[in-house]
Image (cartoon, rainbow, N blue to C red):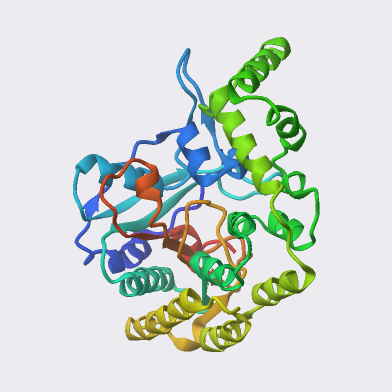
Amino acid sequence: MRMEIPAPDKVLAQIRAPFDEAGATVLDAPILQPLGVLLDLAGEELRERLFVVQGDGAAEEALRPDFTIPAVRAFIDGGKTIGRYFYEGHAYRVAPRGSDRAEQFLQIGLEVFEAGDVTGADAEIAAMGWRAAAAGGRKDLTLLLGDVGLFGAFIDSLELAAPLAQRLKRAFGSPRRLRAELDGSAETERASGRGGERLAALLTNLPEHEATAVLEEVWALAGIEPVGGRSAGEIVHRLAERAALSRATRLREDQAQLIRRFLAISDSPREAFAAIALLGGSGRRELEAALAGWNRRLDALRAEGVPAEAMRFSAAFGRNFGYYDGMLFEVRSAALPDDQPVAAGGRYDGLPARLGAKVATGAVGCMVRPGRAWVGGRP
C-alpha cells in the first residue's frame, strides 16, 4: 500500500487552524467500516476503490475510504439533535490501475449536523475548506462549485413524466448513465457499467418470491457467494425497480437539448446562474428559489473571505459518492489533475435518515488533503 508523503508539522498546524474554532467533537472513527453500508450509500462504483477484508465467517468490511459515513453514524449513536465532528486521520482507497497515487493518506475535516440556515452553513463549510487548502501555501487554487439539487430543480421545471425525471436525477452522478439518457439509448442500464438488464428482464416477469428462489438457485449452481451484504430478495427488488424506471418515457430531442445546454454551463457563478435562469421551463418555482439561495450563498462566501475571481460554477459538476444531494465544492490546484482535489465537500441532508436517524437535520461537511495542500508536496 503506497503511503502519502506527510506534510511537515508546521504546515499541518496551519491547515488545521481553520477548524479549531468550529466547536466540534473529535471523531474517533473505526478503521473498518461495513462494506454493505458503504456500497448502498456511496454506490457500486466505489467497490473497486475499496480495500475489502473479511474475517472467518464474518461479514465483509472495508478500510474506511473517508469519514463522512462514520461521522453520521457517530451523530446518530450520540442521540443528539445537532452536532459537529472534527476528524484527522488516514483514509484508504485503491489507486486506479496504472496510477502511482497514494493509497493511504491523511484527511482533516469537519462534518456538521444542524437544521436552520442552509445557505449560511454551506458557505461556512466551503470557506473553511478553502482557507484550509490555501494554508498549505499554493497560490493557484480555484473553488469549483456545483449543486445536485439545482440539477433536480431544473429537471422539475421541465415538467417531465415523474419516472423519467426520477431516472434523470439518479443518473446525474454518473456521466455515462446521463449521456445514455440524453442520447435516448435503449441500453441505459448497460451503459452505466452496472449490468443486470438481461437478468432484470428475466426476473421481473416473475413474482418476487419466485424470482428470489431462481436467483438463489443460480448462485448455488454457479458456486457463487453473495457479497456486499445484500440478500437475493434485495437484489431482485432493486432489479425490478431498475426495470420499471428503464421502461419509463424517454426524452424528446428538444428536452434532451435543453438539458445538454444546462450541463454545458461553466462560468463565474453569477454568469452561470443567469444562463440557467434563461433555460428553465414553465414549472420554475423551485428553480428560482434555488438560484436565489445561491445568490445568498455567494454573498456569504465573499463575506467569509473567498475571492470572487477564484470561484467557478459548473452545472455538470458532481461527486462519485452517491449520497450528496445539495451544494458541492472542490478546491483544485492548477498544478494537480482535476481528479485530485486539495479539498472537497458538500451537503448530504438525506444521508442521516438513510442510516436510521429519527430526527431530520441538515448535514454538510468538508475535508482537506494536507499532502496535496502542502506546496512542497506533489508535484
Point out the image quarter for the C terminus: bottom right
Query: Could you tell me residue 319's position as x and y percent?
Result: 55, 58
Residue 34 sits above or below residue 256 on the image: above
Residue at 45% x, 64% y: name it.
326
Judging depth in this view, the residue of 63 and 44 nearest the camera is: 44
Residue 123 sits above or below residue 341 on the image: below
Judging depth in this view, the residue of 30 and 328 nearest the camera is: 328
Judging depth in this view, the residue of 200 and 45 nearest the camera is: 200
Residue 186 sits above or below residue 17 on the image: above
All told, the count of numbered labels is 0
Judging depth in this view, the residue of 226 and 360 nearest the camera is: 360
Query: Could you tell me residue 286's position as x and y percent?
Result: 47, 74
Point out the image quarter for the N terminus: top right
Query: Could you tell me residue 170's position as x and y percent?
Result: 59, 54
Residue at 47% x, 13% y: name it.
57
Residue at 58% x, 79% y: name it.
282
Left or right: 290, with 24 as reference point = right
- Dividing the picture into quadrants, the one containing residue 200 is top right
Residue 4 sits above or below residue 293 on the image: above
- Dividing the picture into quadrants, the one containing residue 182 is bottom right
- Dividing the picture into quadrants, the one containing residue 49 is top right
Can I make out residue 98 in this image? no
Residue at 68% x, 25% y: name it.
206
Can I make out residue 149 in this image? yes
Query: Could you tell me residue 214's position as x and y percent?
Result: 67, 17
Left or right: 149, with 85 as reference point = right
Left or right: 144, with 244 as reference point = left
